[in-house]
Image (spheres, rainbow, N blue to C red):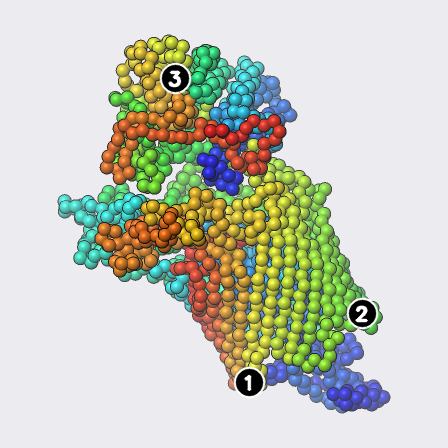
Amino acid sequence: MRAVNTNSQQGGNPGWHEWAMMYQLNNACNTILDAVDKTTFTGDATAKKNAIKAWAYTWKGLAYARLGSLYYAGLIVNTPSVTNNVYVSKEAMIAESNANFDKAATAVNASGASSDFSEIVSALIPDFFQNDKGAVPTAGQWIKNLNTMKARNILVNTPAATMTAAQWDAILTLTNAGVGASDPVFAGNTNANGDIFGSSNYSVAARAVGSNASGGTYKISERLIQDFNAGDQRLAQNFKVYTVWVGNSDRGNAFNTRYAIKDGGNGLAGVYTYVNRTAGNAEIFLLGSYEENELMKAEAKLWKGDVAGAAASINAVRAYQGAGIAAITSTNAAVVKEELRKERRVALAFRGLSFYDARRWGVLENGRTGAVVISKDGSSISTNATIKYGYLDYWDVPNNELANNPAGAGSAPTTNPK
Amino acid sequence: MKKLLLLGVLVLAVFSTSMAQTRQVTGKVTASEDGAALPGVSVSLKGSSRGTTTAADGTYKITVGDGAAITFSFVGYKPQTVSVGSQSSINVVLVSDASELNEVVVTALGLTRTKNSLPYAAQQVKGEELTRVRSGNAFSQLSGKVSGVQITQGNAIGGSTNVVIRGSKSLTGNNQALFVVDGVPVDNSVTNSSNQRTGRGGYDYGNAAADINPDDIESMTVLKGAAATALYGSRASNGVIMITSKKAKKGLGLTINTGLSVGTIDRSTFPKYQNQYGAGYSDPYQKDGFFYFDANGDGQDDLVVPTSEDASYGTKFDPSLKVYHWDAFDPAGPNYQKAKPWVAAANTPDKFYETAISNNTNISLDGATDKGTFKLGFTRNEDRGTLPNSKVSKNIMNLSGTYAISSKLTASAAANFSVVDGLGRYGTGYDGLNVNQNFRQWYQTNVDILEQKEAYFRNNKNVTWNWSDPSTAAGLKPIYTDNYYWTRYQNYENDTRTRMFGNAMLNYKATDYLNVMGRITMDTYDEFQEERIAVGSTDVAEYSRYDRHFEEINYDLITNFDKNLTKDLNLKALAGLNLRKSLNRSIYAITNGGLIVPGLYSIANSKGTVSAPSESYNPREVFGLFGGATLTYKDFLTLDGTIRQDKSSTLPVANNAYLYYAGSASWLFSHHIEDLPWLTSGKLRANYATVGNDAPWGSISNVYDQPAPFGSTILFSVPGTQNNPNLKPEQTISKEIGLEMAFLQNRLGFDATYYHTNTLDQILPASVTTSTGYNSTYVNAGNIENNGIEFSLYGTPIKTADFSWNVNVNFTRNRNKVLSLYNESQNLQLASFQGGVTLNATVGEPYGILKGRTWKTLNGEKLVKANGRYDVTTTTTNIIGNVNPNWIGGVNNSFRYKNVTFSFLIDVKSGGSVFSLDQYYGAATGVLEESALLNDKGNPSRNEISAGGGVIMPGVKADGTPNDIRVENWYGTYGYAYNPQHAFVYDASYVKLREANLTYSLPRALVAKLGGIKGVDLSVYGRNLWLIYKNIPHSDPEENLSAGNLQGYQSGAYPTTRSIGFNVKLLF
């Protein structure tokens, strides 16, 4: 990462993309916030303005959440088309994220009672998103989505081992007021035209579809498959096993696999599918989801000592996704904790959360054992490999930014000391 | 000599005393070198304004008084004055004036200056030199004929020509020369897409200046520096190519040219294939031999060629082995379900190329009377390319006339109308529509191209060698590659450009020294481009259309003053204004998701919902005020100054006016040197100039763009580039000194120039902090320096009545350096190409640096890793090439023996780098002959190491000892997989026999018998006859993607077309 964190690498610097995209999102929202009060509306102008502000603050909250959860430092920019050079710590970025989610909540509350609220929100959310889970939320449902995100901000930015009781309490409170099983979420979708998302390449999962184990651009990791419990219908629904595919030998063994993902599932009714490349049938979680909320709740319960409650939440998620496996009955906290780990991997796969989990569970630092790995020539499959990752937990601020906007006086460190 | 003069004075004195009477004198003017009649010679009475010109047969008639003297003058000949005396018939033989220095040169705004008073570099090329080798494009013919000008043209028919004078000056703006025809600026846009320019596919539609009729060019003057072009204002900061069209001559003249040429590809610029191994990949990528399944329905599994694999690292050919090839799965083919021997193809892809045929016919008619002149020309040029189903045709008509309304007022008008139609232009870059993507990169050496041809033409079906999976019916479709004939005959483009340019002018000669000219010039064209991909192709069927309209109108008012202030001092001055209005308007629409009805190419036939077309509308207005003065003292000292202010609509109101100026001086020092018989003339010149440039359209104020809607949600978004309301104009500062000398009565001469330019405050989109929400913002920044030497030499080593030999040499050496970019930025990426290579402007380096991975080295030797493969840097910012040539030059020799002339031009480019994506992939996939050579042990290198094969890569090991680690010669060994980008950067030097021409003019005596015909020239010519020297394998070093700033990259390069033609020229 650091070798290519130079300005001259431009798009070839992997650290650049999240940074640039999130600040573009932030700037678009700043532009909206700057314009909204200068604009004349018909009808209930206050409600309409607040609905638009709620929308902008929500996405600003996401932008700061993503930046603060990945980079060691960031910039707080709340004016359109300009920036500043005072870098703040990742903690301050998360605080700014929460502040924006709170502003969004205030705006939602100030607007939600008006019928003009849903008129505006229906126009803001693209029409082809507005089905199934992507339905237009009520004011109350919107607030629930914000709470789930605030819970995530706490959970993913603190190592599990050092979480305080107060943090677990906060997560429990937020997730109890978070997204429920029947609530709409901010979910994207595909359409035939490929507006926003192309129906065949809208996510990593969509690009791992294949009729053999070489899949598509992306490969299905053996380590993902091994986290499915025996008999989990989601495995049968979504994956097909083929003869071993071995990638370029110069790229190591990580990509070697027997699995490819199945587009639209293998026809098991009521079982969750990761990918559906038929236009209009994708489900792209832009903020949180019921499963994430419920599993965060499970984790908080577990750490608070409510092992049965934690198991119940995990069971609820499995039932929700049609896993078809027996409910967890164990009251052993360690067993439930392992089930929780596996369930987060399986239920939340391809939702951009696993890096956060690997970080807070210490996998980045300590590696893992008992991993399934296929050897270089494809002839042997080890089920007890040890993998050391050594990835940076938080990335340095991309040099593309620093080269053009060097840190000014009073800035927080922009490089992770690790 | 002195005695003669004395005699003349005496004769004059005698006649001046006699009585004045008027009478008529007649006669004929002929040329000394061949005795031919000279039409259009100015015949004037000395000391009076009366005069006439000779008719087409060289005859004249003039009324003279007693004691008169008649002066005969004509461009290119020494003027001659003859005292009439008592003669009533005076025949004159004019002697050609080889003195280049006395030549009249057309300079900016169409002003004429004698060359010996010109204080800046201007090089003239006669029209005949541009049409000696007939082609539809006059500019590609300039290559090697003018110093200071770099011409680059690819090998596709109708492709664009890159014309850069004195190096690239602008980082991201236009660096192309401005074209002006008789005062009309002619637009030279290249509309090729950014994908096309970066080698990602698309067509090269050529550039618009190709619409100028080569046969109507009297001469082309290249004004190279800012001092010469300052009067044209900002748009001429890259130099000007001024074209003077042919002028009508007295009487009626008719010229007909007609000819035909044929072309074939130069095999040295096309891959040489290995013929020992066939289809397949190898380790480490994916080792596969043959497919194995039941191919003929007998229940037994058979060996089948791995049709889906587009490489040739597969099984060794073995004629005794019977395998099922692609054609075994073509039910309409003769080999359906039949096995064939496993052998290399009899017909390699060079057989895909056909014989190019061009025909060119030109008719021009002109005439003049005392009152006016007219000229009418028509040219038709049709080029059928070397690729099947390709044709570019041009029809150009031009008409002009002048009329003397009174002795003081002259009106003139000219119009040029052209239609250029293209069909099946060559696909370019890394794209399936470019057949060379396969021929050079991804191919199976067992595929016989002529069998593919038969397979297509049998039913016009897409029968490919590249079946996706021949074991299933559903797999009988192309996986990557269509049948190439399908590509050419189904997935073709067509285009047309209809153009009109011309002017209307009134010239009022107020006094003999003051003249006012008002002129309106117009250049307008519409172009239409259609591209299609047929249903049944690998890619989704598609149809797109692009409609573009361009117009530019110039209003000029110019006052010219020309007077001898004293006996020794002449002042030429001018003042003028120019209003330029231009408009660029286009619309592009494309289908989405396929076509409903195959073969119906219309947007309405789109399978998916069509996005709104992308539209552009770019009006622009520039108002200029200018003035200039030239003071000449005694014909040897000239001082020249010009000043111009432009106001441009693309700049912020507060900064929109910009002033630039030029000052020049020349000194004909030979004037002071007498008694040096070998020195004919010598001139020193120097100048200093600044020239500005306005901003790209729409770079001042921020606007939202409107992307395609999300479903029914209408969007407006903030674009990625932030505009800047504080932009200033760009500025180029230019300095130049030159020396021109002629010796031995002009038998030998040279023109040497040194120039230095700095282009400052460049308007460019600089990358900025993305936390602003933008990727880049327009700024004024950067400084590029160019300095160089131009040298032209001419000589006539032999000159007798029957035989002469002329030599012209042009040499250009430009050194270019990026001095600074925006703020502390050290690099500006100009383009990112496929293959991991980028083109950059880097501080301290020339403009146009290639960057990518390189070898790690030890003591200058390439380092190999423990596995015997090269150790390659992880960084991609290493400098691996510089696209600028070290020097360029041309040598033209022409010989004349009686009625036969022979000439040939050698065109040279030394240095400059080119990255070849063709080698990057082609060397990896095993199609090329060098991938299957014998190794150091004399064994086939592709044998496994255990069987004596393998190769040792030249280099050193980590301990510094020579590499002795043998590696398998498998997929990628010589290509991209194991080698850095640096390995595929080649020296683009070349020496080419660019042109040769042999012309025979029928003897006058014979022509006279033909009746009505004044001259017949028969000529044979050739172009690109011999690529004498090059360093890039399998390719033409000159081949490029498109005209423009992105050079030094080849992908799917086209081979050179070597053409030979025949032309007949008839003069009536």
Q: From this view, report whether residue B355 is shown above or below residue A267.
A: below
Answer yes or no: are tags 2 and 1 on the same subunit: yes
Q: Which residue is mark 2?
A: B569
Distance from Cα at disc 3 to Cα at disc 2: 97 Å
Residue type for callout 3: Leu
Towards the viewer: B166 or B469: B166
Q: Which mark is residue B325?
A: none
Contact? badges 1 and 3 (CB < 8 Å): no
Placement of the C terminus of chain B among the 4 image quadrants:
bottom right
Q: Position of residue B240 (x, y in %)?
A: 63, 60
Label 1 resides on the chain identified as: B
Q: Which residue is mark 3?
A: A295
Residue type for callout 1: Asp
Circle 1 crowding by C-alpha within 10 Å: few under 14, some 14–19, many from 20: few
Distance from Cα at disc 2 to Cα at disc 1: 43 Å
Tell me the element at label 1: loop
Tell me the element at label 3: helix
Distance from Cα at disc 1 to Cα at disc 3: 102 Å
Towards the viewer: B522 or B641: B641
Q: Residue at x 49, y 76 (%)?
A: B998
The image quadrant that residue B1013 belongs to is bottom right
Residue B313 makes an appearance in the image: yes
Answer yes or no: are tags 3 and 2 on the same subunit: no
Placement of the N terminus of chain B among the 4 image quadrants:
bottom right
Circle 3 crowding by C-alpha within 10 Å: few under 14, some 14–19, many from 20: many
Contact? badges 2 and 1 (CB < 8 Å): no
Residue type for callout 2: Leu
Mark 1 or mark 3, whichever is nearer to me: 3
Q: Which residue is mark 1?
A: B802
Mark 3 or mark 2, whichever is nearer to me: 3
